[in-house]
Each structure stands twice: as C-alpha cells, then as structure tokens.
Image (cartoon, grey):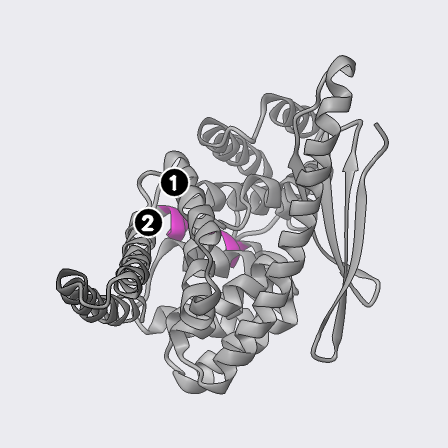
Amino acid sequence: MSDIGYNDNVVVGDRTFHIQTATNKSKGVVRCEVFEKGRLITTREIKYERRKKAQAETSEDHIHSFVKDVHLSTVDELKFLFKVAQRINKAPSTSSLIKLGLLFLKHNLINDAIKTFKKVLSIEPTSNRAMILLASTYIRLNRNDAAIELLERVVKSGYSYADVYNKLGLAFLNKKNYSKALNFFQEALRINPSYGEAQYNAAIAYLQSIPSERNSTFLPPPSIRVERARQLLQKVRMQNKMFDEKIEKEIDQLLDRNEFLQAVQILQNQRDRLFPMDTTGLISTSFYLKFMYDGVRLTEKEIKQYEQELKDAIEVKPEYADLWNSLGIVHLIQCRNLFLQALNEFDRALEINPSYEKALKNKKLVENDGKEFLILLRAILK
C-alpha cells in the first residue's frame, strides 16, 4: 500500500494556512502539519492499526477514510477557531476570550493568543488567569522580563499557587539567575511537594549553574548541587512514566563524567514531552465555544464525539472535576435535542390528525420546556 496524502489551503480573512496530512507506513502513523507563510505551526501524529499483508487490501479503504477524517477535522477546526474569534471580538467577554486564547495556544498560534489575553486585560486588568496565561506565552518566546512583571503582580494580589512560582522560576532560569530561579522552584515545592515539573526544573537549574557559577556564595557547592539534582530527577522518574530508565541512565553517565551542560541539554529537550500542555480541559473549552457561538450547527455527531472524548479523558483523569462538569452539560444538551426531536414528532402527529388534542397538549408542554432548557444551558455556560 502506498502512502496516502491530502493537501489544502485554508483562507481565513487575510491569512492563508496550508494543511498537509499523510501516512507514514514505516511508523504506522498519520502526520498532520499546519503551515503559515511556509512556517510550520503545529504537528500532530496519530497512530493507525497496521495490518498484515494478507489483510492490506481490505484495510486500505479504512486507512484512506481515517486519513481523510484527520485532515478534514483539522481544516474544520481551524476555520471554526477564526470564525468564533470574529464573533467573540464583536461582543467580547473575558470568559470566552480566555477560552479562545487557550485554543490559540493549543494550535501554537502564539501572536493570536497574546492579542487575546491582552484583550482580556484591557477589559479586566486584574484578571489573574489572563496574566498567568500571557506570562506563560511570554516565557515560550523568551520574553522573561515581561513574564516576571505579570507574575509578580499575580503574587502580590494574593494568588499564590505552585504553578505561578514554577513559572517565575522558569523565567529566572531563562535569565540564568539561578539562585532566584531555585528560590521560586523551592517555593512551588513547598506548596506542592509532589510537583514533578518544579522538581525537574529545579534539577536543571542546579546542573546548569555549575559551569558558570561553580564558586557562587548564593548556591551550594557543586557536589551538593549534583546530588540534589539526582534526587529530584529520581522523584520525577517515580511519578512520570514518560521519564524512562534509558534517559535516566544517560543523564547519570553524563553527571558521572561532569558533563553538566550535555545533561542539561537532554533534560531541556525532553521537558515538553514529559510535561506537555494539559489539553484535557480543552475538550470542554472547545465544546463551550462551539455551543455558545455556533450552537445551531452543532450536530448530533459532534455532540457524540465530544461525549466520547470526555469519557475517554475521564478514564485517564477521573479526578478532574471539570471533565465531569462538562460531561453533564453535554448530556443536558442531548436532553434538549431530544425535546426538540419530540416537538417535531408531535408536529408530524398533528399534520396527520389536526384535531388530535393529546398531541397538541404535548406539543405545547415541550415547546415551553424546550425554551427553558436553552435558557438553563446558556446560564450554566456563562
């Protein structure tokens, strides 16, 4: 079977995105890439089931359909994102803008995310959520001073959570201010002792500081820094299955040879894989925007898809209250749709028999309850 591929240009306003999707037979994956002006923006790979040669012909149609679905869903999602952005910006609300910014981040549309979070702050200057998200985006761009200014405002407001201190630590680590970075990572770990990402970042800070600040009076001796880094990485290894034995062994060998910067390079390269952006909550974020700004076109198939995605996410993270809440909303929407379906069926009964009093009574009841369901859903989603 030869590789299967699709290519499309998606025009939104004055911008053009190129989307290409293709199989990689040797890896058994479908790879979907999005470009803007020749620059790769996002990439995602999805595994598909590879069959034996005897089954290849019967499975080719299935794989072809799967690749097409991946491609078209990416095209539709990109179109939807900018259509919703246009609608939100006409009558902006901070809640919707934050959700929109998160989806821009998911698609690595960094400048769009920055504009969106700034718009939130123009409406609500004290929004800690917007400041944290904007600061996180600045850190990705190495705009560390701007990130630090925002995060310090958040801390001064009394919003003292472990993730805020971890982000402050990252910003100072990027600036190579190791003592301040470690202070913030340690504060994050004081609040949440099992915070794996802060443990990992602190280990990087200890190791990265050794070559340039070996004799620092603000930091422990190099031998102690190495030992602390090892201990922190062992804790990460116990919590994070992605941090496998092979990586740990490679790091240990480099540390034994005092090759600290090489070890740091490996750890930095692995960080996004070990601690990816948590996209679990984005299922409900996407669903919220789809319902609030494109609810008329929300098909039963799409609702079923969101329902299944939420159920799959709950299996992985059953402790996420947001997922259960979102699943409840999906089921409420399904109830409302059944009310509307019932209304059509009572109408059909009255078309057949206009004097059917029972059907007329039922229709009136459903009409009233259907309106209340819509009011209820919009009140819940605000």
Q: Earlier in the sequence, mark 1 or mark 2?
A: 1
Q: Nearer the viewer, residue 97 or 179?
A: 97
At a point 38% along the width and 54% down the height, the residue shown is 162
Residue 146 in sight in this render: no
Residue 24 percent across, percent down from the top left: 79, 34
Q: Real-space Cα distance between discs 1 and 2?
A: 8 Å
Q: Tag 1's secondary structure? A: helix
Q: Nearer the viewer, residue 225 or 171?
A: 171
Q: Tag 2's secondary structure? A: helix
Q: Nearer the viewer, residue 49 or 303?
A: 303
At a point 53% along the width and 48% down the height, the residue shown is 219
Q: Nearer the viewer, residue 351 or 209?
A: 351
Q: Is residue 88 left or right of residue 337?
A: right
**Pointer 1 residue:** 311
Q: Quadrant of residue 343?
A: bottom left
Q: Is residue 16 left or right of residue 321?
A: right
Residue 22 in sight in this render: yes
At a point 43% along the width and 38% down the height, the residue shown is 312
**Pointer 2 residue:** 327
Q: What amino acid is at disc 2?
A: Leu
What is the chief secondary structure element of the magenta stretch? helix
Q: Is residue 354 above or below residue 2?
A: below
Q: What amino acid is at disc 1?
A: Lys
Q: Which residues are magenta?
A: 179-189
Crowdedness of circle 2 by 10 Å Cα count: few (<14), some, many (20+)?
many
* 1 and 2 marks in contact (CB < 8 Å): yes
Q: Quadrant of the N terminus?
A: top right
Residue 126 percent across, percent down from the top left: 37, 80
